[in-house]
Image (spheres, rainbow, N blue to C red):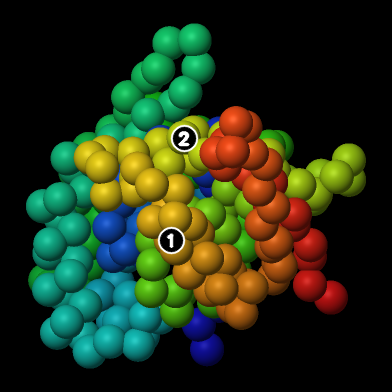
């Protein structure tokens, strides 16, 4: 019997700016969850993902899983994370992904991303992969992870964020498709529906206006019993 996959990520990574496809995000979670809790990862380590296990977890045929993983092999090395701060820093996700016999993918993560995915001792979120693996929207997963950064804060269990900042975190600020708040809100409502139905938390959205325009969002987070 396969053990449950536990995903851990730093809160800084969870609230950073990046854009991954749904299958890329699933792949990274498989890498992170496949590491034993006592295993130390460094820049020479190779994390392993099995094609068959990937197919099993996401309910797809092995042939389809292999096709998705080969696509990730090409696209993920081109993706970056932007860590906000006084000086915004762009960090690559991975250095290389190697395929062995169409069955095993070996992943070398960038040394600067490793402290945010592995060897975590404090300031991290964690969840079982089962909670989010059936989500259809990458935005639902991102919003879930962002909400998890406050889900165990005894001070309030609420996340306050500016509309434009959240758009940036979800990489929805490019172009004018979501310029109108109504369009962006549809994305949020769909994501909250998935979060509330499938995960270990319940999230309620509140809006705050400035000069008749919604400027601030408050996510009230409650852990399900």
**Nearer to us in this view, 13 or 3:** 13
The quarter holding residue 214 reads top right
Label 2 secondary element: helix
Q: Is residue 62 visible?
A: yes
The extreme right residue here reads 154
**Nearer to us in this view, 158 or 57:** 158
**Image-based side of 225 in relation to 143, left or right:** right
65 w.r.t. 214: above or below: below
Residue of label 2: 164
Residue drawn at x 18%, y 70% is 68
- Residue 178 percent coordinates (x, y): 34, 48
179 w.r.t. 92: above or below: below
4 w.r.t. 221: above or below: below
Quadrant of image for the C terminus: bottom right
What crowding class fits label 2: few (fewer than 14 Cα within 10 Å), some (14-19), or many (20 or more)?
some
Residue drawn at x 49%, y 33% is 165
**Image-based side of 197 in relation to 224, left or right:** left
Residue of label 1: 187
Residue drawn at x 59%, y 78% is 198
**Nearer to us in this view, 147 or 5:** 147
């Amino acid at each position: 019997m396969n053990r449950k996959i536990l995903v851990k990520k730093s809160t800084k990574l969870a609230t950073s700016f990046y854009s991954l496809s749904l299958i890329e995000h699933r792949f990274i979670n498989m890498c992170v969850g496949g590491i034993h809790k006592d295993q130390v990862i460094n820049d020479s380590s190779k994390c392993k993902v099995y094609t068959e296990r990937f197919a099993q977890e996401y309910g797809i045929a092995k042939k389809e899983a292999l096709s998705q993983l080969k696509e990730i092999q090409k696209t993920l090395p081109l993706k970056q994370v932007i860590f906000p701060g006084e000086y915004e820093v762009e960090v690559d996700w991975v250095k290389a992904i190697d395929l062995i016999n169409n069955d095993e993918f070996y992943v070398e993560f960038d040394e600067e991303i490793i402290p945010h995915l592995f060897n975590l001792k404090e300031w991290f979120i964690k969840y079982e992969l089962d909670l989010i693996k059936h989500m259809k929207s990458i935005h639902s997963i991102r919003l879930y992870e962002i909400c998890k950064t406050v889900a165990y804060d005894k001070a309030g269990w609420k996340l306050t964020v500016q509309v434009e900042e959240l758009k940036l975190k979800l990489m929805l600020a490019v172009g004018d498709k979501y310029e109108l708040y109504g369009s962006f809100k549809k994305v949020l409502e769909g994501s909250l529906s998935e979060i509330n139905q499938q995960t270990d938390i319940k999230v309620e959205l509140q809006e705050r206006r400035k000069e008749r325009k919604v400027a601030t969002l408050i996510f009230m987070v409650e852990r399900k019993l």
